[in-house]
Amino acid sequence: MKKRLISGLLTVALGAGLLAGCGGSASSGQEGGDRQDTSSVVVAMGPTSEPEAGFDPAYGWGAGEHVHEPLIQSTLTVTNTDLTIGYDLATEYGASQDGLTWTVKIRDDVSFTDGEPLTAEDVAFTYNTVKEASSVNDFTMLDYAEAVDDTTVLFHMTRPFSIWPYTMAVVGIVPEHAYDSATYGSNPIGSGRYILKQWDRGQQVILEANPDYYGEAPKMKRVTILFMEEDAAFLAAQAGEVDVAYTSATYSDQQVEGYSLASYASVDNRGFNLPAVEETKDQEGRTVGNDFTADVLVRRAINIGVDRQEMIDHVLNGYGSPAYSVCDQLPWYNEASQVAYDPEEAAALLDQAGWTLGEDGVREKDGQKAELHLLYATGDSVRQALAADFAGQMEELGISCTTEGVGWDTAYDRALADPLLWGWGAHTPMELYNIYHTMEGTGTAQYSPYSNETVDTYMDQALASPDLESSYELWQKAQWDGSAGVTQEGDIPWVWLVNIDHLYWVRDGLQVAEQKVHPHGHGWSVVNNVDQWTWSQSGKD
């Protein structure tokens, strides 16, 4: 196996370099369960998990495509394990009848780690700052935030936005009196469960429990995050230098003495966009649309012609689940998205659309070959393998496929005409909106040519709902209402393949607290509740 042939020089570098920075907080090279410190944990994450701009919510910490709890800062709300909304700083919240004003009451017993009290002024300041500065999240729905008194903040909206509680669950509150956009990311002051003790860029982050935290005291007093490539993380686990190490299905057939392989369900999905309009050129000269996938019968044939379980078994080594939407099993998921693998019906749909098999095994229609040029992100071995597997399955249906690795600098434009293997999945219904809703003034959705007025209307109504719970049915109708939607019997402008399980090597004796379904991004999600992790007796022996 290629992964076993890593140079011994890397092992030396691990022992002498990166891991030396952990000091006494790490496991001191002890093997398996032979571990002394039960109040700390060392976790290896991928290099892309390190926040480039630091730990500042205004520049993406806790947000974007890698949504997670900010740990260092408190949030107004939290998402529970079932993805419903719970409280953190907030004690109650509600929206006005027109949906244009949200009133949030907050606790009066919270202080920042510099001793200053956290008030509604800090909350308003944070949101007004994030609105102006955020390069990751869209805050166009927020007009401005206003502190009415020390414990009441009003959010004045530009439009109704029923899913605002999900936004409140990822925005960490910063102190107005101690915030400097140039330095805060490196030296954050917060009121969360942990304090940033040390950050060695490109190497590690050390968090220590906040002794003045207003909630339940963290069981883990010290959390060290190491940023490592996957090969290095595997070696670190083999050497007993980490307690938890991210990994992938590539390593799932390996054994690490003193560790078990933990698998956590995710909505971290992979799927292809299927351009739903015929080929043309836009005002910028880009090719938009695809004459083959513009036919809805073709798109339906592709969707039921995919053996998702075969992909899970052969590409993911069994660590995944079939994906039928961008929001499988979340509260706003519509079960009508699910389809059965049916290659015979897929072939019949292609026949019905006029694509008949030629002597070379490739379907043809009016002299045109049934062809797909499939794109995937360069350097992503899993996406490359999924694209190759998908291509093989399509060729069994008589659709000739080629694959190409592309950089993200060109991928977005290329995907306007050719299917691209994307990764999505978030703890908010806004993911549906971002993928399927028509952008104002363009006549098409953002990432792939598609538009449906009925689908748009349901999503607009969902955002304008008087409360979060009543919006779920409308998000579900946008997927399928019995006659229109984005599922198999509707427009099916995307074909979803698999949800990738997030895999970690976990040291024997470490009890990782219950995980909520992970969103896109194999990183910080696993430590959302690290404060409740514990070591069993075997971890002490």
Image (cartoon, rainbow, N blue to C red):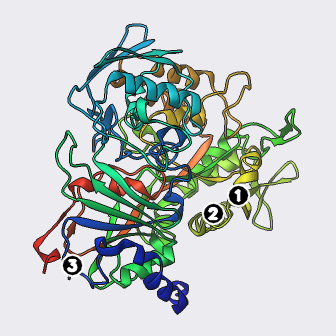
Q: Earlier in the sequence, mark 2 or mark 1?
A: 1
First along the sequence among labels 3 and 2: 3
Q: Which residue is mark 1?
A: 375
Label 2: state its secondary structure. helix
Between residue 59 and residue 427, name the one nearer to us.
59
**In the image, residue 159 lies at what x, y percent?**
52, 15
Q: Are marks 2 and 1 in contact (CB under 8 Å)?
A: yes
- Which badge, 3 or 1, comes first in the chain's sequence? 3
How much space separates mark 2 and mark 1, taking CA atoms? 8 Å
- What's the residue type where badge 1 is placed? Leu
SS under mark 3: loop
Front disc: 3 or 2:
3
Using a 10 Å C-alpha cutoff, classify the residue at mark 3 as few (fewer than 14 neighbours), some (14 to 19) or many (20 or more): many
- What residue lies at 50% left-to-right and 50% top-to-bottom? 54
Q: Which residue is mark 3?
A: 35
Q: Nearer the viewer, residue 351 or 298?
A: 298
Residue under the image location 61 percent in, 62 percent down: 390
Report if residue 252 is visible in the image: no
| Amino acid type, mark 3 | Arg
Q: Is residue 317 above or below residue 54?
A: below
Q: Which residue is mark 2?
A: 387
Vertical relation: 514 (above or below) 99: below
Q: Position of residue 322 (x, y in %)?
A: 45, 55
State how many labels appear.
Answer: 3
Mark 2 is surrounded, within 10 Å at the Cα level, by few (under 14), some (14 to 19) or many (20 or more) other residues, namely many
